[in-house]
Image (tube, rainbow, N blue to C red):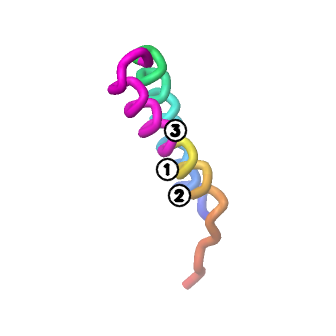
Amino acid sequence: MDNDAKTTSYIVAGIGVAVTALGWSLLPSQWGAGIMGFGLAHVVLGLLDTLRPTVRR
């Protein structure tokens, strides 16, 4: 995987961390739980994307 693809994956994970923190601050409500889950999904998917192999052309 080239550096640009890894950088994008880390940016997605970083945005996920920020959204998770926002959800954590709103946690007593169900909106907070939903926002936190959405952020955690971005963290997991962003980090999994760094492990994905690329196909060379």
Tell me the amino acid under the disc marked 3. Leu
- Out of 33 and 2, give the one closest to the viewer: 33
* Residue found 48% across the figure and 20% down from its top: 24
Tell me the amino acid under the disc marked 1. Thr
Cβ atoms at labels 3 and 1 below 8 Å apart: no
Mark carried by residue 29: none
Q: Which residue is mark 1?
A: 8
Mark carried by residue 5: 2
> How would you rate the neighbour count of disc 2 (Cα within 10 Å): few for under 14, some for 14-19, many for 20 or more?
few
Tell me the amino acid under the disc marked 2. Ala
| Viewer-nearest of discs 3 and 2 | 3
* Residue found 45% across the figure and 30% down from its top: 36
- Out of 8 and 27, give the one closest to the viewer: 27
- Give the SS element for disc 2: helix
* Residue found 52% across the figure and 35% down from its top: 14
Where 9 falls versus 40 (above or below)? below
- Out of 21 and 15, give the one closest to the viewer: 21
- Give the SS element for disc 1: helix
Q: CA distance from mark 3 to mark 2?
A: 20 Å
> How would you rate the neighbour count of disc 1 (Cα within 10 Å): few for under 14, some for 14-19, many for 20 or more?
some
Q: What stretch of residues is rendered in magenta?
A: 27-42
- Give the SS element for disc 3: helix
Residue 37, position in %: x, y? 46, 37
Q: CA distance from mark 3 to mark 1?
A: 17 Å
Badge 3 or badge 1: first in the primary sequence: 1
Q: Is residue 33 highlighted in magenta?
A: yes
